[in-house]
Image: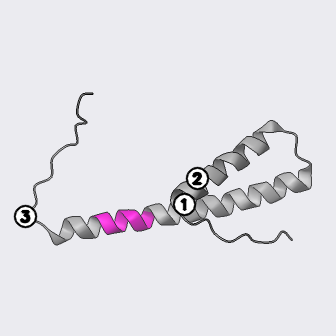
Amino acid sequence: MPKKAAPPANFETALAELEQIVARLESGELPLEDALNEFEQGVQLARQGQQKLQQAEQRVQILLDSDSEAPLQPFTPEAE
């Protein structure tokens, strides 16, 4: 059983690690056992990332609900 690594410090780090895992898996050069270990780590990172996104969504919803008087406007990026 592979050792479980400490979770990444933040969402961006987890996403970067997940992208690296995908690249290694897509290369097709890993032995089966290594590929399975990488896949397992990738699933864990994806779940952690999904959880962080859900938490962020909840925080945004709480902030929006707490100020019902604040008007919402569509985002339009400024022309560069």
Q: Amino acid at mark 1?
A: Gly
Residue 33, how many percent across, how many down?
Answer: 90, 56
First along the sequence among labels 1 and 3? 1
> Which residue is at a point 19% across and 43% down the rendered structure image?
74
- Is 49 on the left or on the right of 20, as rendered? left
Are the residues tagged 1 and 3 within 8 Å (C-beta)?
no
**Separation of marks 1 and 2 at Cα, in angstroms:** 7 Å
> Which residue is at a point 84% across and 68% down the rendered structure image?
2
Residue 4, how many percent across, how many down?
Answer: 75, 71
Q: What residue is disc 1 on? A: 49
What number is the disc on residue 15?
Answer: 2
Are the residues tagged 1 and 2 within 8 Å (C-beta)?
yes
Mark 2 nearby-residue class (10 Å; few <14, some 14–19, many ≥20): some
Q: Quadrant of residue 76?
A: top left
Dominant SS of magenta comes to helix
**Separation of marks 1 and 3 at Cα, in angstroms:** 32 Å
In the image shown, does 6 or 74 lie closer to the viewer? 6
Q: How many marks are shown on the rendered structure?
A: 3
Q: What residue is disc 3 on? A: 69
Q: Is residue 33 magenta?
A: no
> Which residue is at a point 69% across and 56% down the rendered structure image?
42
- What is the magenta range? 54-60
